[in-house]
């Protein structure tokens, strides 16, 4: 018994000694852990209070089944987006803030994501908009691009002049946008006339989000109907003609450019479905011609140059211009 007591005393003395000599290190660590704990508790309580009794509507990617339509109000415009967490150009911290801004928009939305991200993203959508939001679960292996072009993306990666910051998953996400958009249009939960793909990170400034709460303008969306695409760089007719005839030198140079912006595009439902189908036809043609398929902008630009009756190019000279254009 004496031996045990002496060991206990020694242990207590050792702990006190460690604490006293490392006080300035231990205290801030304890404070940080306490703050993180309180934040997690607050988020959990907020989630329970705001979302436990609301219709949280989910669907599967690879089916065209109908969901009970009593949940939905009709909306002229549906926004489509997605989020998948893996190595990309921006940190998760930034995406969380940008996503929170985007999800404040008072518009019907279809959101594609994997199940592991669902709970983390759900609480960013205001409670009053949950009945105009569809969450569709899809893993990378469910992607149309994964099932049809995975091996071709591997080949494109080998010739990618920007492979230091790109990867095969990014290729698939970028090219899957058209299938996400087409799927949402075919399901058409909200009986919408227009559909727009919008990158989840497009609305980056907290100070500006209030003026975009009701974005996009229905009047602006109905002006034309064709799939509107932001043209960042205005290429010469020589370049455009070279692309049309699949000139290998011009296509190789074109691979390095970002002349159209793939972060936002869309239009009337019939045009959107035609565009999305044509996008994958272009991917297959590019594969046959041994042309790089890693960046969706290349196929989008090609469609815009060759199908002016289907698409409307809006020249801006900058990224994300359609946010302003459709406001």
Image: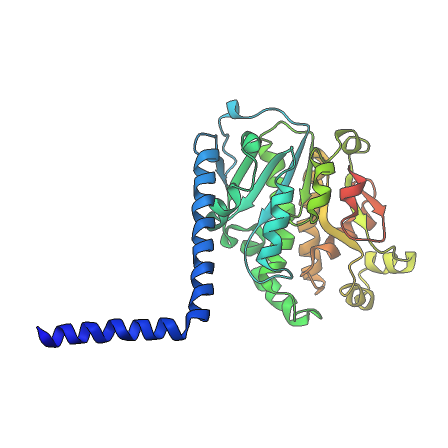
Q: Quadrant of the N terminus?
A: bottom left
The x, y position of residue 127, in whole percent, is: 54, 33
The x, y position of residue 97, in whole percent, is: 61, 50
Question: Residue 235 or 3: which is nearer the viewer?
Answer: 3
The x, y position of residue 281, in whole percent, is: 68, 50
Q: Residue at x 72, y 51 (%)?
A: 262
From the viewer's perspective, tell me whether residue 240 is left or right of residue 152.
right
Q: In which quarter of the image is residue 34?
A: bottom left
Question: Residue 279 or 196: which is nearer the viewer?
Answer: 196
Q: Quadrant of residue 12?
A: bottom left
Q: Which residue is drawn at 62% across and 68% down?
A: 155
Looking at the image, can residue 288 be seen? yes
Q: Which residue is drawn at 70% across and 69% down?
A: 162
Looking at the picture, does residue 83 appear above or below residue 247? above
Furthest-right residue in view?
A: 237
Furthest-left residue in view?
A: 1
Question: Residue 90 or 181: which is nearer the viewer?
Answer: 90
Q: Quadrant of the C terminus?
A: top right
The x, y position of residue 136, in whole percent, is: 52, 41
Q: Residue at x 62, y 55 (%)?
A: 94
């Amino acid at each position: 018994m004496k031996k045990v007591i002496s060991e206990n005393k020694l242990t207590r003395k050792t702990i006190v000694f460690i604490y006293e000599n490392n006080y300035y290190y231990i205290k801030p660590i304890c404070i940080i852990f306490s703050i993180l704990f309180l934040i997690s508790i607050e988020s959990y309580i907020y989630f329970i209070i705001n979302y436990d009794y609301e219709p949280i509507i989910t669907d599967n990617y690879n089916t065209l089944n109908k969901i009970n339509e009593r949940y939905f109000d009709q909306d002229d415009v549906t926004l489509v987006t997605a989020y998948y967490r893996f190595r990309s150009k921006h940190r998760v911290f930034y995406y969380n803030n940008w996503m929170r801004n985007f999800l404040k928009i008072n518009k019907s939305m279809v959101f594609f994501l994997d199940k592991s991200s669902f709970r983390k993203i759900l609480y960013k959508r205001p409670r009053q908009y949950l009945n105009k939001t569809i969450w569709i679960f899809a893993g990378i292996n469910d992607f149309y691009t994964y099932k049809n072009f995975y091996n071709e993306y591997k080949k494109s990666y080998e010739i990618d002049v920007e492979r230091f910051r790109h990867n095969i998953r990014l290729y698939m996400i970028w090219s899957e946008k058209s299938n996400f958009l087409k799927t949402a249009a075919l399901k058409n939960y909200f009986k919408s006339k227009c559909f727009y793909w919008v990158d989840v990170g497009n609305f980056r400034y907290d100070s500006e989000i209030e003026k975009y709460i009701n974005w996009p303008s229905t009047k602006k969306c109905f002006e034309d109907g064709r799939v509107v695409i932001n043209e960042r760089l205005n290429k010469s007719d020589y370049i455009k003609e070279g692309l049309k005839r699949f000139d290998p030198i011009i296509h190789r140079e074109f691979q390095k450019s970002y002349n159209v912006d793939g972060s936002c595009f869309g239009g009337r439902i019939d045009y959107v479905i035609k565009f999305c189908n044509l996008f994958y036809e272009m991917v297959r043609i590019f594969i046959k011609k041994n042309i790089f398929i890693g960046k969706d902008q290349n196929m989008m630009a090609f469609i815009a140059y060759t199908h002016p009756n289907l698409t409307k190019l809006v020249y801006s000279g900058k990224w994300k211009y359609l946010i302003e254009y459709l406001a």
